[in-house]
Every structure is written in structure tokens, then in C-alpha cells.
Amino acid sequence: MSKHEVIVYSSTGCPYCEKVKSFLKDRGIEFEERNASVHKEYFDQLKERKIYGTPATLINGKLVLGFQEKKLNKLLGLEENTVAAGAMVPVTNNTTAAVATVPDTLDAIFQSVDEKVLSDVYDFVTIGGGPAGASAAVYAARGKLKTLVIDKAPKAGTLAITHKIANYPGVREELTGLELLTRMQAQAKDFGAEFIRSTVLSVDFSDEIKKIEVAEGTIKAKSVFIGVGAKAPSNKIKGEEEFTGRGVSYCSTCDAAFYQDQVVAVVGDNDEAIHEAETLAKYCKTVKLLIPTEQLKGDADLSSLEDNPNVEIYRRHRVREIVGTDSVEKIVILNDRKEEQEWNVDGIFLYLGGMKPGTDFLKGAVIRDEEGYVMVDDLLRTNVDGVFAGGDARRTPIKQAVISAADGAIAALSAEQHVNKRSKLRPQYS
């Protein structure tokens, strides 16, 4: 029985709501869920509090907006590694904590670093457990390579926080990115791959046995796959953090209904921003799409918005500041003539691009380009023998889960050739 009164305001299809609920369930915390997209009374309760986004979690009356693991732990009086009662596994060399016994969840798949992990020499280690790393682990483990996957935040990657996947080959039903990723990782674990949660601090690829430094010690491997993915820049707009959940949002599926017949800004120069503006236009009186650059990125196309009477498009407009008291009231923008203006808006949805591969920890261990992408050949080999890279860690023509998964398969087969000193790649047919 939980000693805390916990209420979670959620929305259908909201990936961050699922993360909050999973966090609470895994730690045995009872909670009341109030779905604001199903029950209007819960929607109204949020608006009365000037909360314009989900998840919104009340713990003994104290509010947590979004998924903030540290704040949830603090208000619940939990250690950061505490999870629900069940089987005991090591957390550090000398302590234990309980983990959920539910199969095929990320908390059941990922374990903590122990002495065995540090003493073994693995055939294949993948840094990153997203679609590239998980797919690589499936092929490597099935190919009889002793396989380890390292991921510092399994539920925080691009695929894990994607609210809906409907185009992954062979998966006919719609599912969340987290569900798809968990299936991949569980499949790899079934073949014998090991998964640990830890942060890679540095690497040393100078010897035949590669060394990967984590906080708990050194992991050794005969081959390594760099599948760390990419992330958005950490620079935030002034006022963004202050008003997150109070007018600043990142998900129209979660929060569009809060802005019925209101004015919102959408900021971004990519396909996601355009798609989200299109969705918001079905609810809002006016959607102001601010494109920071002249040209859109990739295959993004404005044609679906140009004739929409609810959408105003502004190229070369940047947001300088988000202003309000209890919630967002205005944005300060720099227009295409470099003039500063104030616009009245009820909310702002941010989809700023500039995805950057999370490869800084590599330093000079392998050759990277000017943006940090790892340079590889057709078999995903880097300039270092036995080290491979793929997914969003390399420069792909377009970022899709299926492309990352294909990279993982190629890299694992290349690693199997390297480890077993074969003259050519050996495919897996059966």
C-alpha cells in the first residue's frame, strides 16, 4: 500500500504519460489516473490550475509537470535505483535493489553493472540500446557472439518517446515506440544478449581488446558497435523551462485539446513541425508557424499548410523569449528584418531541429565529421579495425527506426566476421 496520494493527469497517446505511469508501477506506487482526453472534468481541472499539458502528476498535493524522474524520486522519498518488490539483483558491487518481475519490460531487461560484467571479455559490445543497438544485439547474440548492450537511459531515446509507430515492416498494429523497442530488446535477450544501464565515459580502441570506461569500471570487448543515436541541442529558449506544461509543449497529440479556439505558435523547420502544425490547426483559431530558416530540412513540405486558413507561415522568424505570469502569454520574436516584436499567444509548441549525434565521448578514438557523425564504409566499419557505427550515430539519408535497425544487422554481421576472422560476411538465413 502506497503511503502517498498520487494522481496522474494523462492523455491518450502521450508517451511521457506512459513513462510516468511505468515509473510508478515499477516502484509499486499506487496512483489514480485521470485521463484528460477522455473525461472533460479532468481536462477542466487542469485548465483551472493553468496547466496546459500532460502528464501532470500530483504527489501529496505537489505538482510535477512532464516526466522528471529526479523530482518524482524526491517527492516519493525514493532512491534513484529503487524499483518494485521482486527478484533481487545487484545495483553496485555491494548493494542490491528489487526489480519488477514483469517480463519483457525495459526495467526487467536492463540490469546494473556487476563484477561479472567487468571481468568478462565480450565478443561484441553495442554502445546504445535503441533500434540500431537492439537489432545489432539480436544478430550478434543469435550468431553466438557473447553480446552486451550498454544504455544510459533506455526509455529516453528518440524511438522510446515516439508516441505512435504504424509503418514498421511486419508490425501491422499501431504501437508506441517504447513497445516496439522493448520487443526488439527482449528478442535480443532471448538469444542471450545482456543489457546494462550505465553511462560510457570514454573509450580506448588502441588495442585488439577494446576498453570502454563506465562509472563502475572498465568493460572489455573484441568488437564494438557505436549506436548512440542523436539528440537535440540542450540550449533552451529563455522562459522555455519555466513554462513547460504551462503553455510550452512538445507534443500536439498530448496537448492540442487544451488550445481549442486559441492562438498558438509552432516553431521548427522540419517535417515534424509541419505535421504538428497541421494537427493543431484542427483545434486552434490560429497557428503561427515560425520557421527559423529560409529552407526546410529534408523532405519537409509546406503544401499541406499553405491553403489552410488557420495557419500563418513566417520564414526566418526566431523566438527569443517566452513571456507570461502563471502561463504563456506572449513570445518575443526576431522577424525576417531582424526586428524584435512581441506576439500574443496562448501556447507554443517547439520542434527545433539540429539533431546532433551523441558521440562526444569518443573524442579522437574514431574519425568523425565536423558535426560529430562517425565516418563508416558500406559495411559500417570505422577507421579502427573491429569498431563499427550505425543508426543516427552515422550520417544517414533519413532518420527512421527501420534504417537504424538495418544498420544494426549489418554491423553485427561485420563484427561476427571480424571476431571469427572470416574472409567474408556470413548471412543469417534461418
Image: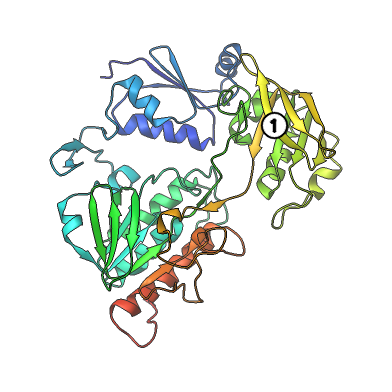
Front residue of this view, candidates 124 and 105: 124
User: Which quarter of the figure is the N terminus placed in?
Assistant: top left
Residue 330, x across and y down, in percent:
72, 22
Residue 200, x across and y down, in percent:
34, 52
Q: Please say if 250 is above or below 37.
A: below
> Label 1 belongs to which residue?
320
Outermost residue toward the bottom in this view: 423
Amino acid under disc 1: Arg
Residue 45, x across and y down, in percent:
56, 13
- Tell me the SS state at disc 1: strand
In the image: residue 230, left or right of residue 69:
right
In the image: residue 262, left or right of residue 258:
right
Q: Is residue 170 visible?
A: no
Q: Please say if 76 is above or below 390.
A: above
Q: Please say if 421 is above or below 129.
A: below
In the image: residue 151, left or right of residue 375:
left
In the image: residue 291, left or right of residue 37:
right
Seen at 33% across and 67% down, the residue is 205
Front residue of this view, candidates 156 and 7: 156
Seen at 30% across and 73% down, the residue is 143
Q: How many marks?
A: 1
User: Which quarter of the figure is the C terminus placed in?
Assistant: bottom left
Residue 129, x across and y down, in percent:
39, 54
Outermost residue toward the front in this view: 364
Q: Is residue 200 visible?
A: yes
Outermost residue toward the left in this view: 94
| Disc 1: CA contacts within 10 A as few (<14), some (14-19) or many (>=20) | some
Q: Quadrant of residue 409?
A: bottom left
Front residue of this view, candidates 383 and 429: 383
Q: Quadrant of residue 423?
A: bottom left
Seen at 28% across and 80% down, the residue is 420
